[in-house]
């Protein structure tokens, strides 16, 4: 069937442009070499608050980043309006390589891991000595996540006016973890704050702990210019408080180049993402003894070379016990 009549000319015929006349597609993306450097302070429903020099800038993730998400503590590259004025929005076009990552999953059977904080130097595990009672298994899980993510752990024990810290400190003494013990009175008069600050100066510290332990109260004392709402009630039946901090937030430590990152209260800390073989790196006194271990040794089996290594006097048996206790945390629930 003919589409045109007998006497058609070139004006009657519609031709498609050839490939040479169309704009070619490319996978080459702009390098954004002139992008500004920023630090992600908090994330809220797709909007990221970033610090660019001395300005607070609102930003969103550029489409070219795909599914890669920026989290609190990330160092990013931004383009667009970075004036920091109201109703302006910049774009995050690049997420710089991370030096450390704190991850967690909902539980040990959940393969979906969530990055909580990036680029932190240390993880402060805040635990109340009473009201609510300490949960050593949850502490163990936080320590494993810290070791696996490249963070140095710090124990902060609160409410020492309600219970002594000796029993808990004895449990973690062989791990050589720095610690600070505080009471409510010391928080009020500032003496506890001064001791905690000694561990934070010059570092980026992420604070974690389950609700009701006084984590946000401590953060408010450390960063008084940024008051966050605290937990006012601990359930008498469950011994747990309400979540009042709903998003992670990075705050500058006054009079120091350190940073404090307050995170939401946790009730579980899944370790599905953790490779148990990385935990041994946190025990440099035991690591040489693993050279004689069978391939893929879990370090908690009959053929493990660490037993003979410790028996020969190369390391403290209590250190081996601590290692195996941490490695076993994935088989135990936090409330055990």
Image (tube, rainbow, N blue to C red):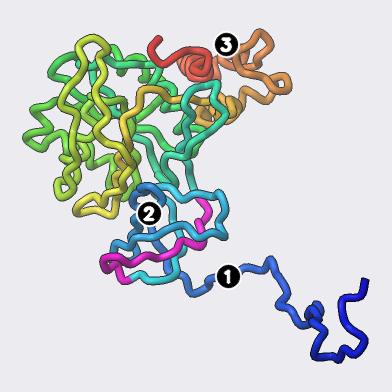
Image depth: mark 2 or mark 3 in front = 2
In this rendering, position of residue 47 left or right of residue 94: left
Disc 1: which residue = 31
Disc 2: which residue = 48
Residue 262, relative to residue 48: is it above or below? Answer: above
Residue 80, relative to residue 195: is it above or below? Answer: below
The one of 107 and 204 positioned closer to us in this rendering: 107
Magenta stretch holds residue 331: no
- Categorize mark 2 by other alpha carbons within 10 Å: few (<14), some (14-19), many (20+): many
Identify which residue is drawn at 20% across, 19% down.
Answer: 234
Mark found first going from the N terminus, 2 or 1: 1
The one of 208 and 302 positioned closer to us in this rendering: 208
| Image quadrant in which the C terminus is located | top left
Residue 233, relative to residue 18: is it above or below? Answer: above
Q: Are marks 3 and 1 in contact (CB under 8 Å)?
A: no
Task: Determine whether the residue tagged by mark 3 lies in a helix, strand or loop.
Answer: helix
Disc tally is: 3
In this rendering, position of residue 311 left or right of residue 154: right
Disc 3: which residue = 311
The one of 174 and 93 positioned closer to us in this rendering: 93
Task: Determine whether the residue tagged by mark 2 lies in a helix, strand or loop.
Answer: strand
Where is residue 127 drawn, in percent x and y? 28, 24
- Categorize mark 1 by other alpha carbons within 10 Å: few (<14), some (14-19), many (20+): few
The one of 41 and 59 positioned closer to us in this rendering: 59
Where is residue 275 drawn, in percent x and y? 59, 28
- Residue 265 picture quarter: top left
Where is residue 324 drawn, in percent x and y? 52, 16
Report how far apart the C-alphas of labels 2 and 3 lie in the structure. Answer: 53 Å
Q: Are marks 2 and 3 in contact (CB under 8 Å)?
A: no
The residue segment tinted magenta is 83-98
């Amino acid at each position: 069937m003919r589409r045109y009549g007998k006497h058609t000319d070139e004006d009657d015929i519609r031709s498609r442009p050839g490939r040479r006349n169309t704009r070619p597609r490319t996978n080459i993306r702009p390098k954004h070499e002139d992008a500004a450097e920023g630090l992600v302070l908090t994330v809220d429903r797709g909007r990221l608050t970033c610090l660019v020099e001395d300005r607070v800038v609102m930003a969103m993730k550029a489409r070219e980043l795909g599914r890669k998400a920026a989290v609190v503590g990330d160092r990013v590259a931004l383009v667009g309006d970075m004036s920091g004025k109201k109703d302006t929005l910049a774009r995050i076009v690049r997420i710089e390589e991370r030096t450390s990552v704190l991850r967690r999953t909902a539980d040990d059977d959940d393969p979906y891991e969530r990055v909580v904080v990036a680029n932190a130097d240390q993880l402060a595990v805040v635990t109340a000595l009473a009201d609510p009672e300490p949960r050593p298994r949850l502490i163990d899980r936080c320590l494993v996540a810290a070791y696996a993510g490249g963070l140095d752990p710090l124990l902060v024990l609160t409410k020492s006016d309600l219970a002594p810290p000796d029993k808990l400190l004895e449990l973690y003494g062989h791990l050589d973890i720095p610690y600070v013990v505080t009471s409510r009175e010391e928080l009020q008069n500032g003496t506890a704050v001064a001791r905690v600050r000694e561990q934070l100066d010059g570092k980026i510290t992420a604070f974690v702990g389950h609700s009701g332990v006084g984590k946000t109260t401590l953060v408010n004392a450390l960063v008084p210019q940024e008051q966050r709402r605290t937990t006012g009630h601990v359930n008498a039946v469950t011994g747990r408080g309400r979540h009042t901090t709903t998003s992670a937030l990075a705050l500058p430590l006054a009079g120091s180049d350190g940073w404090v990152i307050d995170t939401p209260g946790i009730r579980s800390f899944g370790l599905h993402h953790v490779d148990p073989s990385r935990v041994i790196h946190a025990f440099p006194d035991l690591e040489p003894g693993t050279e004689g271990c069978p391939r893929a040794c879990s370090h908690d089996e009959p053929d493990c070379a660490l037993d003979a290594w410790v028996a020969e006097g190369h390391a403290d048996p209590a250190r081996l016990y601590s290692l195996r206790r941490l490695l076993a945390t994935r088989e135990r629930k936090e409330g055990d």
